Image (cartoon, rainbow, N blue to C red):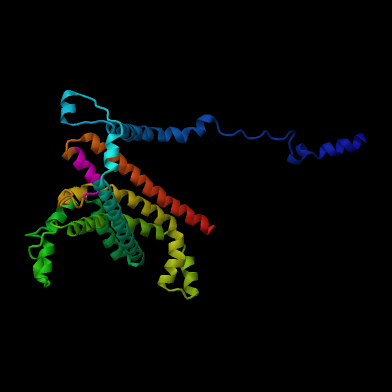
Amino acid sequence: MSAQIEEVAATGPASRTGKGAAPPPRRGPGRLVRGVPYLLILPAAAVTVLLLGWTLLKNGLLSFQNLGPRQLIQHLTEWTGTDNYAEQLGSSEFWGVTGRSVVFTLANVVLIMALGCFIGLLLARLGTALRLLLSLGLVLAWAMPVVAATTVFQWLFDQRFGVVNHVLDKLGWHSMAGYSWTSGQFSTFFVITVLIVWQSVPFVAINLYAATTTIPKELYEAAALDGAGARKQFTSVTFPFLKPFFLATTFLEVIWIFKSFTQVFAINEGGPDRLTETLPVYAFQEGFGSQHFGMGAAISILTIVILLALTAYYLRLVLKQEEDEL
């Protein structure tokens, strides 16, 4: 019996490893190693909280005050509670600007995504020389400062000396010779939309082209063997593979277009008759234009809340669609 026990012991884990004893278990990484990622992002997080969080907090406190020239001169703090919010939420003008901002955002996002995807797919099919030339043009348009680009478009659509009116007049539309593009609501929005789309399309196109380079060519070859044309390859290969890109880019464009201020204000300051004001411009005009800074702060907070609601609704649709596919 003792000989059998010794034999079993000899065939145990120690003998199978060829060592006198089993190796000790590996110890996990220390707390310092696990905390390195958090230490690396700490400076950026601190700067973000300092520049954005503190500003947002001060703006939120200001929205509950009655702050005008008299209060600023006398250094008075007059708390009004939720009066600023109640006045705006009960104002038909505020809801009119909100609806206008939503429609304006949707129209621009649809145009940007459609043109950006088209140009991005075109880049993937062009030769090296043409692709480089088109990419250079996109980068230059994207890199141009917003104020500089807006100034250029003001020159292009100028009533007397604008290139657009001159070209349309030469093409036979003689009534456009002295047309004022900023005299009407629709025409002003048209100029602003062209400007914003022109500035935003390069981001979508270049990123889409970069994303298409990650798609395995074998997928297109297999689709071609199955007789799929260009449209079928896009719907069965390109779009499913790049769906996360489309969702993320659309999400970013909604945020960027909804909060756009410089283009709308610089073209015509929200005119004519404040008919092209979006929520950021409306907040500026009510705050700085009317010298009612508390009201402007309240409108800016409401703008953030509406933007969060729109993005939350969009994300909910995306998540629901992904759950249905699963």
Query: Percent x, y for residue 31?
Result: 53, 30
Picture quadrant where residue 108 is located: bottom left
Query: Which residue is nearer to you in this view: 324 or 20?
Result: 324
Query: Which residue is nearer to you in this view: 85 or 296?
Result: 85
As drawn, 71 above or below 171: above
- Give the residue displayed 40% in from the left and 33% down from the top: 42
- Give the residue displayed 16% in from the left and 38% down from the top: 290
Name the side, left or right, on which 63 lies relative to 179: right
Taking the image as drawn, is residue 309 in sight? yes
- Give the residue displayed 18% in from the left and 31% down from the top: 68
Query: Percent x, y for residue 211?
Result: 40, 57
- Give the residue displayed 44% in from the left and 51% down from the top: 316
Picture quadrant where residue 192 is located: bottom left
Answer whether residue 285 is magenta in the image.
yes
Query: Percent x, y for residue 200?
Result: 28, 55
Answer whether residue 319 is magenta in the image.
no
Quarter of the image containing the N terminus?
A: top right
Query: Which residue is nearer to you in this view: 114 or 304?
Result: 304
Picture quadrant where residue 282 is located: top left
- Which secondary structure dominates the residues rendered in magenta? helix
Q: Extreme bottom residue here?
A: 227
Magenta range is 277-287
Name the side, left or right, on which 146 lies relative to 178: right
Query: Percent x, y for residue 146?
Result: 21, 49
